[in-house]
Amino acid sequence: MNKNKIIGCCLLLMLCFCKMAIAQQRILLSNFGAKPDSYENASPALVRAIEQCRKFPNATLVLPGGRLDLWPDGAYKQEIYISNSTENDTLPKVKNVAFLLKEFKNLTIEGNGTQVFLHGKMVAFALFKSSNITIRNLSFDYERPTMSELMLTSVSPTKVEAKLHPDTRYFIKNGKLGFYGEGWKSSNHHTIVFNEIDETLKYSSFKVFLESKAEEKQKGEVVFTGDFSKTKLKAGEKLSIRDPYRDNCGGFISLSQNVLLQNLHLHFMHGLGVVSQFSENITIRKVNVAPRPESGRIISAFADCFHFSGCKGKVLVDSCTTSGAHDDPINVHGTHLQIVAKTGSTKLTVRFMHHQTYGFEAFFKGDSIAFVNPKTLQPIAYAKLKNAVLKNKREMEIETDKPFAANVAVGQCIENLTWTPEVTIRNCRFERTNTRGILMTTRRKVVIENNHFYKTGMHAILIADDAASWFESGPVQDVVIRNNVFEECGYNSTPGSYVIAIAPENHDLVNGFYVHRNILIENNTFKTSVAPLLTAKSVDGLVFRQNKIISSKTVNVTADKTTFHIEACKNVTLTDNSFPADNKPMLTTSHMEKSEVKMDW
């Protein structure tokens, strides 16, 4: 072999070894002082290990397995403004974060089956301006969840006896029961009751308990004496109680891209769950949101489970389970900001309008926007942004590349058209929630398929859009809902509830204008006797076909016999569906010609 060939081979080998070294750079958390199953605070060790990962272009942080305890002391601190979760400017927005990744690239967190127990109010993980991040094979729980739970063991008109869950810390002062945790005490008591026999969650109230006299029968057992004659509570039911103030989230993904969450078990999340905010290409695969079976708890999420606000690219939720959410398992939306001032022919000041959403950039240079009439949800004009600046926590100043249309006015809203994702939700199970299953508002392609919606308290799927209440945008233009099972959904708001609701909040109907379009609902199975199937408003192109409807006898039939309610829609098809012989479908329409509906019964 000549000299040049030898040199070439040596260089090739060196290059291969370099690539292997980069690819195989593994950082062991145990080398930084973390001791599994020790119940010692591993936060300082975790911070040191994450900062070590920053030194390598392609690192894997390997957790040790077993139980790992993390306290705020020694953990990361980060100011975070969270969509749908930011309230009260008098309280700090600095959060304690377990895994904080800021401007990371190509990092994998390999959980190795580790069970992470958080103490106090902590965010499990937060990503800022990071890309190509994988978090896999670990679980998160709270040592003391911010959800208190108790089971009613005896109920009479004058006395109720209850057994508190062992994870629920409580006190009795001056005959009143209160709840506390690691660094917090409940001030309010939002309450939902779970009936284990029919597996339903319904809104309730803790007021009657607060007005009663509480006495400790023995540790973990409390007797309430008062007027319970007007309650509908039953022995065996379980109450879940939380302070409704959202001051945190389970996980946070901001201004990041190509993020994979895989094989995670989220046993409790305080606040809004996993929030993806202005991020691109998010995959959530085989993530289980449910209490640990051995814990005996019923609630896993303080509010939503997976929340996507102003994202783009592709969102995929695949083979996941949510069980025990106090709010919606999945919510996908943008945010309408309202025009509060015109400062030039190309400049506007816009404002966050909902009290829970503010403090972050909602528009960026180069974004495309639509000007929207909030009463009709009709687009008025379109523009592209030359600049966008966050002036303060609630207002942004935006500048368009050309003078905006003359009919653009103060009081109208703007929607960010660039930050709207394609969404696929498949092979998932949604159960044990008192609210909806999926909320969906995005103008790019949506596929919801092969999922099981089991006893969602409200609509299994809600397609909304509004610029007056939550200010969650925007219209849908291509939605496919197929091969799903909807079982006894909508029990929590009957009569008037529907399994699937298309309900934009356009308070002024405009003849010939439709908010949503191209929605296909096909090959699904509806097992129901508690709620009608479909309500739809302001849709052009709605198809409900080849679905199988099975009457369930487990719940009394609602007084509302309407199967379909269609309002102000066009090009509606209700055909080739299979109904029980004793259940003839019924249709009602309003603000439209009935001839716009094609049906075959």
Image: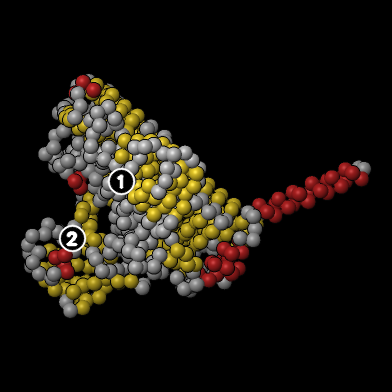
Q: Which residue is farthest right?
A: 2
For the point 33% across and 42% down, the residue is 409
For the point 19% across and 29% down, the residue is 591
For the point 47% across and 49% down, the residue is 388
The answer to whether 248 appears left or right of 244 in the picture is right
* Badge 1 element: loop
Which residue is under mark 2? 205
In the rendered image, the quadrant that contains the C terminus is top left
Badge 2: residue crowd in 10 Å (few <14, some 14–19, many ≥20): some
177 w.r.t. 54: above or below: below
- Residue 565 visible: yes
Which residue is under mark 1? 411
> Disc 2, disc 1: CB below 8 Å?
no
Front in this rendered view, residue 223 or 130: 130
x then y, percent, for residue 10 = 83, 49
x then y, percent, for residue 99 = 50, 62
Q: Which residue is farthest bottom?
A: 174
In the rendered image, the quadrant that contains the N terminus is top right
Residue 227: mark in rendering: none
